[in-house]
Image: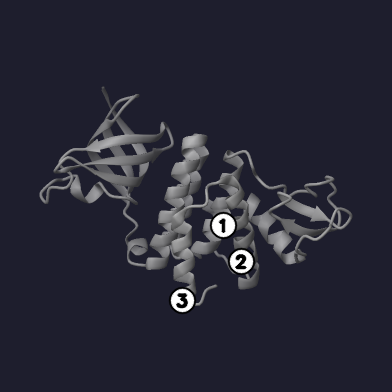
């Protein structure tokens, strides 16, 4: 095994033996890797504080191409302190890490790391977690090979008179192809196209009407049900939103 220094984010952790942990770390260079953090559960261990979910840093490891690598130390970049103190933020962040882990296992791509990192940092900085989650959800569909058609009618290819955003038709529907799909406002059509093309790292503010946000969120929930990647952690978010009257 060779020593490597790899930028990564811990997506999940599992207790191992009496004192250790196995970490699932998303990296740009190697994708999703398993890392053994020996003794991390011991109170005095130097690895204790950096061997948990939602740690972003440079991981110094004995890298093993197949099987578990071994953690030496972590040069911390961000521990997401603000996120951990807010139930809504941590719920969305946890959902996104779960989702990314599933997507990464189907199609590993360095862009996935960048998208997740940028999204988590924006949530940490206080930008709207629901909108950011929807933006990332939309971008991840491309890696699953099922990205909705948001440039033209998904049935005939026309770019004119788009009047519906339909999960069953996998994107936009024009007036000529319209049957009984839900009618969609021009504002929703423009906004979801913005979601698709915006660079997450460049977002500085998110002032979008809540009705538009809600409609896009419902569309993406329905769309993900078709992919088979609708996760339980998203249901937990719905429960939180109901309690806080955000739905």
Residue 6, relative to residue 180: is it above or below?
above
Quadrant (top left/top right/bottom left/bottom right) for the C terminus:
bottom right
What residue is shown with label 1? Answer: 134
Give the left or right position of residue 233, taking residue 228 as reference. Answer: left
> Residue drawn at (68%, 47%), measured in percent from left and top?
148
- Report x, y in % for residue 71: 24, 36
Q: What mark, if any, has residue 103 been given in the picture?
A: none
Extreme residue in the left direction: 44
Residue holding disc 3: 244
Give the answer, above or below, for where 225 lies relative to 239: above
Q: Regarding mark 2 in the picture, which secondary structure is present there? A: helix
Q: Are marks 1 and 2 in contact (CB under 8 Å)?
A: yes
Left of 4 or right of it: where is 18? left
- Find disc 2 in the rendering and name its residue: 213
- In this view, the residue farthest toward the top is 1
Q: Give the CA separation, mark 3 to mark 2.
A: 16 Å
What x and y, as percent, mark residue 33? 36, 34
Report the side of 82 relative to 198 (left or right).
left
Please report whichever mark, 3 or 2, sits nearer to the chain's N-terminal start.
Answer: 2
The residue mark sitting in front, 3 or 2, is 3
* Callout 2 crowding tier (Cα within 10 Å): few <14, some 14–19, many ≥20: some
């Amino acid at each position: 095994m060779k020593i490597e220094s790899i930028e990564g984010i811990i997506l999940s952790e599992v207790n191992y033996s009496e004192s250790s942990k196995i970490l699932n770390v998303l990296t740009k260079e190697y994708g999703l890797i398993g890392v053994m953090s020996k003794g991390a559960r011991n109170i005095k261990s130097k690895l204790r504080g950096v061997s948990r979910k939602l740690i972003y840093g440079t991981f110094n490891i004995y890298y093993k191409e197949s099987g578990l690598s071994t953690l030496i130390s972590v040069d911390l970049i961000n521990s997401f302190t603000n996120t951990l103190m807010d139930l809504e933020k941590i719920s969305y962040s946890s959902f996104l890490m779960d989702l990314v882990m599933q997507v990464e296992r189907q199609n590993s791509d360095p862009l996935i790391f960048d998208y997740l990192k940028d999204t988590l940092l924006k949530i940490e900085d206080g930008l709207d977690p629901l909108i950011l989650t929807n933006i990332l959800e939309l971008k991840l569909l491309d890696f699953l090979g099922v990205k909705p058609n948001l440039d033209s009618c998904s049935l005939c290819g026309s770019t004119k008179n788009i009047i519906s955003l339909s999960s069953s038709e996998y994107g936009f529907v024009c007036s000529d192809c319209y049957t009984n799909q839900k009618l969609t406002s021009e504002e929703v059509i423009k906004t979801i196209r913005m979601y698709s093309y915006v660079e997450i790292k460049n977002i500085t503010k998110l002032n979008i009407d809540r009705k538009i946000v809600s409609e896009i969120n419902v569309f993406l929930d329905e769309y993900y049900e078709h992919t088979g990647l609708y996760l339980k952690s998203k249901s937990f978010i719905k429960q939180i939103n109901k309690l806080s009257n955000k739905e």
